[in-house]
Amino acid sequence: LAKTTQPISMDSYEGQEVNITCSHNNIATNDYITWYQQFPSQGPRFIIQGYKTKVTNEVASLFIPADRKSSTLSLPRVSLSDTAVYYCLVGEDYKLSFGAGTTVTVRA
Amino acid sequence: EAQVTQNPRYLITVTGKKLTVTCSQNMNHEYMSWYRQDPGLGLRQIYYSMNVEVTDKGDVPEGYKVSRKEKRNFPLILESPSPNQTSLYFCASSLRGAGYEQYFGPGTRLTVT
């Protein structure tokens, strides 16, 4: 299972775009990249998933370069309610743990 | 409404007193999983189940047991709880595996004294 590396924390201000980059150098050919969001004392919530190039939904965009060794989650025009921990996961196996994630703090 | 439910939500118990945390999903998902979350450590997988009667260890299975007798239920059993099992526990389910979108329960906050 590919390991991932992402920044521990990021600060931003309301209305800005937040980009979180995740490194996964050992990603396997069949692995998908998935991002989750977690608020304090709640279970993680699925945000977006992709395999290559770019994926966009109503919440975020996911950019994946051709070599797939990294990916970037983009949150457009963040608000205070986007303050949360964001996890990057790679793999399609059954065994999977989340790392410490990236704590994003949005300030007014 | 599609959901994963856990009970109890909060539990304070004493060392050695067996307990069970229930987990149930109504989405006919094949895959279910238990995680524990401790400050600074993210979510670590305890056990997972690929389908009925099929379970396997995650990263931190010591001190826990699970069973999957029905597709919808996946209880977590602590035969002899210890203080180091004080944690926030989450149950999750997905269509087929960890790579599919996982739906998480609300969490169970367990304190073992």
Image (spheres, grey):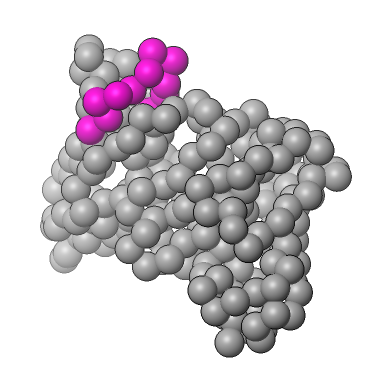
Overall secondary structure of the magenta section:
loop
Q: From this viewpoint, is residue A64 visible? A: no
Quadrant assignment, res A39: bottom left
x, y percent for residue A30: 44, 15
Quadrant assignment, res B13: bottom right
Total marks in image: 0
> Residue, x 45% and y 54% (percent of image)?
B43
x, y percent for residue B59: 50, 48
- Asked if residue A95 lies left or right of residue A70, the reply is right
- Asked if residue A56 lies left or right of residue B73, the reply is left
x, y percent for residue A103: 26, 57
x, y percent for residue B22: 74, 61
Q: Tell whether position A26 is magenta.
A: yes
> Residue, x 37% and y 59% (percent of image)?
B41
Residue nearer the viewer, A62 or A96: A96
Q: Tell whether position B9 is magenta.
A: no
State whether residue B100 is above or below residue A16: above
Pick out the residue farthest to the right.
B69
Q: From this viewpoint, is residue B60 visible? A: yes
> Residue, x 37% and y 67% (percent of image)?
B39
- Asked if residue B80 lies left or right of residue B60, the reply is right
State whether residue A18 is above or below residue B21: above
Which residues are the magenta region?
A23-33
> Residue, x 27% and y 29% (percent of image)?
A24
Residue nearer the viewer, A81 or B60: B60
Q: Quadrant of the C terminus of chain B?
A: bottom right
